[in-house]
Image: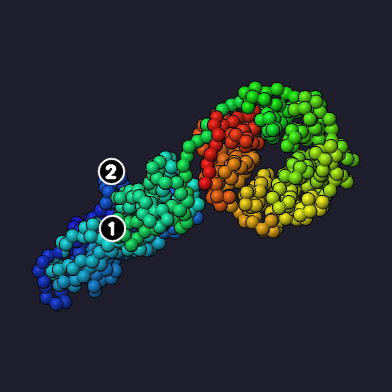
Amino acid sequence: MRNTKSLKLSFILGVLFAFNLTCSSDFGEPGELGSISIEIIFNNDSSQSSKQSHDWIDPVKDVIKITKAKSISSDITRLIIIIPGVDTVDVNVSPGKTVSETIGGVPVGQQIIKVYLKNIVGEILYTQEQTVKVKPGEISSPSFAAEDFIPQNQFIEIIDPNGGEIWGLGTTKDILWNSSHSNLNVKITLFSGGTISQTIAADEPNNGSYSWDISSELDAGTDYTVRVSSVNDISVYDESDENFTLYDTPPFAWTQTGLKYGTVYDLAINPQGHIFAGVSLKLWRSVDFGSTWQIIGDFDPNGFNQRERIAITKSGRILVTENTKIRISDDNGNTWSYANMETNHSFERVHTIAIAPNGNIYAGRLQDWGCTTCGIFKSTDGGNNFSWVFQAPHEDEVFVRFAFKPDGQIFAGAVSWNDHQMYRSIDDGSSWNYADTFLQGGVDELIITNSGRILVDMSISPSRGFYASDDDGSSWYRIGNNTIERFSGGIVIDENHTIYAFKSLWDCSPCEIGYRSNDDGESWVPISKEGYPLDTDHSPVSSLMTPSQHIFIGTEGSGVLRTTSRVYFGN
């Protein structure tokens, strides 16, 4: 016998509402049978959803965060009914369809009926059990209400912030998570150092995303975690795997100087506070802190290095790379002469020049096929004469950076497709050896912090990233994630040992102008692009920290910017 009413299950985009079984309250004789009629209705009308009936996982978030996505879906696709003495009923369900089924041959009397709701992979999401009285030939009528279903196999898994994120106070960020049972609301809690700092949301829909307006009243710190927990069962929760950072976000105030065009490859300052900018084919000077600029020197446009570097001694002597040579000036750039520097090729350019604390000057020249006077040069007389001291084993080696430790060690960074990009001298530059274990690709920036830690930005694969060494280059470890890299805008350090590293804005995500660290590179927070007057086509290319603690930035195609006031982010 078939009947077509009594049990209803409403389903909206995988959303459970309710269903009913009906039966009489009388008992029959032993061995007699009754029946139960079931009607299941699946509805796509999302307008019927409610706060307590939303049960789905946003598939878009699963795609975006595929490494954290679960293999199961919380959509209910199967209904299982177990009645003693009767074959198990297994009904496939889908939105927009109605399923009617009559279950006959049910023994009369008091029967325990179990209902399981499963997802597509057969995992039980909800259960409910009712005692039903069955009378011969008639239909039962207890209610299986949606709110009486007991959740099973619940999970919550945080996506963001899950450790290592750097979020600004006063900004808005999305907290993201994966979960089952999204009809069960969640609580979101912020912890600092393992202690509750703030309830972010007390009772929110479990839809996998919450837009968090991060209060500027919170303390900046590096020991924050977020917990997302089920409101109906506090034992169901997940917390960030590792700490994330909340940082203070006052943007730097930048102003355009009087030099408004040209790509500025290097910046330097002399003892009188005059600023020098190396632009393609030109050297510029400002004697009024960037307000106005003049082209100086008598450089030959056909010979001037298009990526010139500048070094200035304590006495004020200016040294500038020019093609295969080095020019020097002792009168603030008004007149120039050449340093003595041997070469047997006309195309091996000098790519970098730097002054050691003891006054010795080092220069790096491109190594090419057949060149016997390429590699590293050294001057002990203030730049009048340079002697060749080292040629690396690879003919395509380009020495681009020098850095000096207080104990006299010197490090040289190179660009090469071969095995080694870092070299070290322990005898004042007379001899050099490898100073790495695996770095390959090319050094973009290289500095040594106040504690002696070496920081290097590798700009080319396979070792692209930002690395540190605490053992004089014998071993290296990577710092941060893939946003802590590409510091082609230079790295500078202020008088309080805060490090500022400026980024290329090409393909940046997030698009910050750079990062800063006041703990010797252990942790980094963004330098906001807010206030930076140029777009992403005009990235920082070079940078300079002045004695007055202002930062000058040389840009790609738009001249020189500077901060309007001194910077300070001390410990």
Which is more toward the observer, 232 or 74? 232
Image quarter of residue 478: bottom right
Disc on the earlier residue, 1 or 2: 2
**Of helix, strand and loop, which one carries label 2?**
helix
Q: How many marks do you count on the picture?
A: 2
Quick one: 282 or 143, which is closer to the camera?
Answer: 282
Mark 2: amino acid? Ser
In the image, taking residue 376 as reference, residue 482 lies left or right, namely: left
Residue nearer the viewer, 33 or 340: 340
**Residue 275: where, in percent of width, then height?**
67, 30
Give amino acid for label 1. Asn
Give the left or right position of residue 213, taking residue 39 as reference.
right
Task: Sort mark 2 into few (<14), some (14-19) or many (20+) by Cα contacts within 10 Å.
Answer: few
The x and y percentages for residue 285 are 70, 26
Q: Name the residue under label 2.
A: 47
Please give the label number shown on residue 232.
1
> Quadrant of the rendered structure where residue 29 is?
bottom left
Tags 1 and 2 touching, CB below 8 Å: no
The residue drawn where x is 78% and y is 43% is: 360
Q: How far apart are marks 1 and 2 (CA)?
A: 24 Å
- Residue 505 lies, in percent from the top left, at 59, 37
121 or 104, which lies in front? 121
